[in-house]
Image (cartoon, helix red, strand yellow):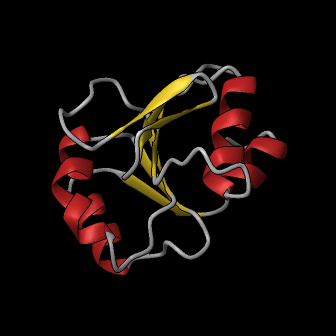
Amino acid sequence: MASKKTLILGATDNPARYAYLAAHRLVAGGHAIVNIGIKQGEVAGAPIQLAGDVLPDVHTITLYVGPQRQPQYYDYILKTNPKRIIFNPGTENSELEVLAKEQGIDTIRACTLVLLSTGQY
């Protein structure tokens, strides 16, 4: 399986959160990660950064930010121009899905952890 550089939006260093588990499982699966969150820290060997400069070559953005907080990230997400966006449970957002699809970005409503564990990532 080829590595898919993944931006984790909503990254956290709290081990009780799914974003934390996803970071560790992505790295264990050989995927490069970029952690974007609201607090500095580190998870799975990568720093947690604030959304800022658009990063090149991001294959997937996996969302761990609820739909009510997503609008502030729309420009950042769309300028990053990933191949796909994964809307994890609780992050579903029809408005962002439409914006992404208009730009040719695939969207999927799924759980990153399940995709990884079933070999569908």
Question: In the displayed structure, does residue 58 sit left or right of residue 19?
Answer: left
Instruction: Say above or below: 95 vs 88.
Output: below
Relative image position of residue 81 (x, y in whole percent): 26, 41
Identify which residue, 43 or 64, lies in the foreground.
43
Quadrant position of the C terminus in the picture: top right
Q: Please report the residue visible at 27 percent of the width from the left and 24 percent of the height from the top.
A: 56
Relative image position of residue 84 (x, y in whole percent): 43, 47
Residue 96 visible in the displayed image? yes
Q: Please report the residue visible at 26 percent of the width from the left and 44 percent of the height from the top.
A: 51
Relative image position of residue 64 (x, y in whole percent): 51, 60
Instruction: Say above or below: 45 vs 40.
Output: above
Quadrant position of the N terminus in the picture: top right
Q: Residue furthest front?
A: 40
Residue 102 visible in the displayed image? no
Question: In the displayed structure, does residue 109 sit left or right of residue 74?
Answer: right
Count of labels in the image: 0
Instruction: Say above or below: 74 vs 27.
Output: below
State the image quarter where residue 66 is shown: bottom left
Identify which residue, 10 or 30, lies in the foreground.
10
